[in-house]
Amino acid sequence: MKTALIWGAGGGIGRAIVRQLARENWQILVAGRNLNSFTDLTDFVFDVELSDAFLVQSATTSISQEVNEADLWVYACMVQIFHPISIDSHSVKGCIFR
């Protein structure tokens, strides 16, 4: 059986990928927020705030205790950090993208 780890499974794209892989009988591990609806598809549900590096590391440790490897790794989450920007005629200042 192939194994997939889907980060950001609670969003639209991640959710669609999980459902498709479940139809194809993959073993699925899901990580992210709003994952209650996946308990019927997998026993491997990791509720984690993906914008917090410590929580991601903790989830990674927990996941590694469940499986040795993944045949498919999907990062379907979108983490946004917005900072105020000021625009003048010559430049964009204070804009940080991570």
Image: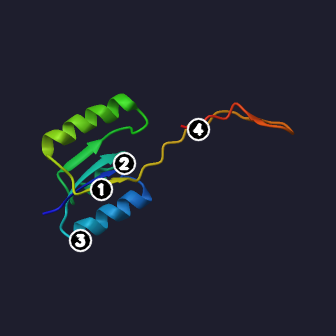
Task: Give the residue number, with chain letter if any, for mark 1.
Answer: 37
Residue 43 location (% of width, % of height): 17, 51
Disc 1 marks a residue whose amino acid type is: Ser
Do the CB atoms of the residues marked 3 and 1 lie less than 8 Å apart?
no
Q: CA distance from mark 1 to mark 4?
A: 32 Å
Q: CA distance from mark 3 to mark 2?
A: 21 Å
1 or 4: mark nearer the eye:
4
Disc 3 marks a residue whose amino acid type is: Arg
3 or 2: mark nearer the eye:
3
Task: Give the residue number, with chain letter if any, for mark 4.
Answer: 97
Query: Disc 3 or 1, which lies upstream in sequence?
Result: 3
Residue located 26% across and 66% down the image: 21
Residue located 22% across and 71% down the image: 24
Query: Disc 2 or 4, which lies upstream in sequence?
Result: 2
Q: Secondary structure at mark 1?
A: helix
Q: Which mark is residue 91?
A: none
